[in-house]
Amino acid sequence: MQYRRLGRTELMVSEIGYGCEWIEKKSAEEIRGITDRARAQGMNILDCWMSNPHVRSALGDAIRDDRDRWIIQGHVGSTWQGDQYVRTRDAEACKVAFDDLLERFHTDHIDLGMIHYVDEVADWEHAMGGPYWEFVRELRDSGVIGHVGMSTHNPTTGLLAVESGVVDMIMFSVNPAYDMKPASEDINELFGEYGDDIDGMDADRLAFYRAAERADIGLTVMKTFAGGRLLDPARSPFGVALTPAQCIHYALTRPAVSSVLLGYASEEQVDSAAAYETASPDERDYASVLASAPLHAVSGLCTYCGHCAPCTVGINIAQVNKFYDLAEVQVANGGEVPELVRDHYRALEHTADECLGCGACEGRCPFGVGIVERMERAAELFA
């Protein structure tokens, strides 16, 4: 396992980390097995956004004997209320949930205290302007959290966090579908290696990456496989499937990225991810795969480029489509809509059920996506 410096935190984190996202339905014994395998593969960073008491206890017990070798991302604002996950900025609820995390992890400190899931500017301003931030700052100043971080999918709020100077690292969603420049560009020119040609990135995301790099804000990565969509040729926006090694390499070659945190549903998936470390250059090469993808592949498939905006009623169509695709992949494979994805969707100011079906967006979509139909399906899926 290779290790990288996590920006100005100076922490050395494993390139491949433990995202913990898919263990909620696992038994304590299964979680221990996955955790033991992650440890054996040299992983030393784990993210626990989950507030579910079962998951926290199982993870805490699994790392109890060597807690100090683990760099833990613990989230402030992920709470358990009424037997379900609730994201909140209520300081008192956050305190209860964070104390619970410490207790279940058998520790008196969390290495990376994450401002949990900030995707909208208004939420950033609200979080930083009142008791919530005071609580986070109190945790930092008292040493209960070693460094302040933030999780976001939005480069705009990510850039605000970088420029604020209050965060030391950020957890961000990174993969070639999310980074893709608006679809009018030639796919053959989109995806060069970092340090070579990254002009194919969406301008807002590139600005965020560059700002993080300049400020020495290390990035940890989520959504590396786009919820599995990039691994499936039928669902990939490129019309071809990428391998786990190619997706991981893409993320690790973005500016400021230190670690890719993957969710594992089995010990075998841990080994598959860790195999990146011994993969050949050809096995890691995503650029040639994307460059040779059929140019017609993106027809009818949303790449979240945002050309469809503005919506008549203010729906963020790209975000709705992103959450729909993440959820639909899991449902198609016999699972349920992930709780976190459902919460992200519900947090949007306007959701798919508000769609008027006017079709104005479809006339602006360079991919020919049937947006009205997708809004109907999204509204049904998240009902």
Image (spheres, helix red, strand yellow):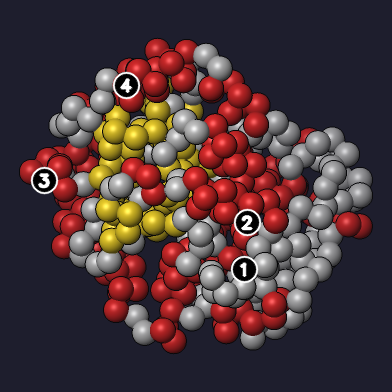
Image mark for residue 206 = 2
Query: Is residue 340 in sight in this rendering?
Result: no
Whether tag 2 and tag 1 are in contact, CB under 8 A, the answer is yes
Of residues 78 and 28, the one drawn nearer to the viewer in this rendering: 78
**Label 2 or label 1, whichever comes before in sequence order:** 1
Of residues 181 and 88, the one drawn nearer to the viewer in this rendering: 181
Establish if 206 lies above or below 46. below
Q: Position of residue 273 (x, y in %)?
A: 34, 68
Q: Which residue is mark 4?
A: 141
Q: Amino acid at mark 1?
A: Ile
User: What is the secondary structure assignment of the residue under circle 3?
Assistant: helix
Q: Which residue is mark 3?
A: 66
Q: Nearer the viewer, mark 2 or mark 3?
A: 2
How would you rate the neighbour count of disc 1 (Cα within 10 Å): few for under 14, some for 14-19, many for 20 or more?
Answer: some
**Label 1 or label 4, whichever comes before in sequence order:** 4
Q: Residue at x 27, y 53 (%)?
A: 12
Q: Position of residue 106 (x, y in %)?
A: 15, 32
Q: Amino acid at mark 2?
A: Leu
What is the quadrant of residue 199 in the picture? bottom right
Q: Amino acid at mark 4?
A: Asp
Image mark for residue 198 = 1
Q: Is residue 219 left or right of residue 30?
A: right
Q: CA distance from mark 1 to mark 4?
A: 38 Å
Q: Position of residue 260 (x, y in %)?
A: 40, 58
Q: Nearer the viewer, mark 4 or mark 3?
A: 4
User: What is the secondary structure assignment of the residue under circle 4?
Assistant: helix
User: What is the secondary structure assignment of the residue under circle 1?
Assistant: loop
Q: CA distance from mark 2 to mark 3?
A: 38 Å
Q: CA distance from mark 4 to mark 2?
A: 32 Å
Q: Residue at x 54, y 70 (%)?
A: 195
What is the quadrant of residue 101 in the picture? top left
